[in-house]
Image (cartoon, grey):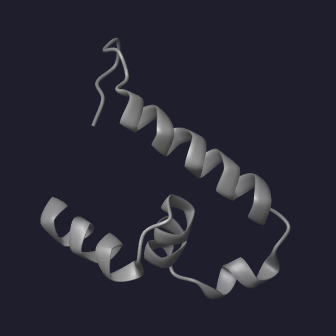
Amino acid sequence: MATQGSPLTPEFKRVIVLLKDYFDRTQDDVREQDYSCAERAAQALGVGIATGKRVMADFH
């Protein structure tokens, strides 16, 4: 994760853009409430749900 004052990597900038685009596209979609946070994060970043859960398990 980036620390305050450090330059952002191109990969981290891409994550920010992906998340912003996803939230813009789905802001009025009530169906999004049916998904867990892990599922929404995976969808936003264009990865599989299993990948998202595996990354979170490794992180914790």
Residue depicted at x 22% and y 74%: 54
Q: Quadrant of the C terminus?
A: bottom left
Q: Is residue 60 visible?
A: no
How far across and how far down the image is residue 19, in percent?
58, 50
How far across and how far down the image is residue 30, in percent?
80, 79
Residue depicted at x 65% and y 88%: 34
Residue depicted at x 31% and y 14%: 6
Residue depicted at x 24% and y 66%: 55
* Residue 36 in the figure: left or right of residue 60: right
Q: Is residue 12 visible?
A: yes
* Residue 47 in the figure: left or right of residue 9: right
Q: Is residue 3 above or below residue 25?
A: above
Q: Quadrant of residue 53?
A: bottom left
Q: Is residue 31 above or below residue 23?
A: below
Q: Quadrant of the N terminus?
A: top left
Q: How many marks?
A: 0
* Residue 28 in the figure: left or right of residue 43: right
- In the picture as drawn, the residue positioned furthest to the top comes out as 5
Q: Is residue 24 above or below residue 8?
A: below
- In the picture as drawn, the residue positioned furthest to the right comes out as 28
How far across and how far down the image is residue 28, in percent?
85, 67
Q: Quadrant of residue 57?
A: bottom left
How far across and how far down the image is residue 52, in percent?
34, 71
Q: Quadrant of residue 43?
A: bottom right
Q: Is residue 43 above or below residue 19?
A: below
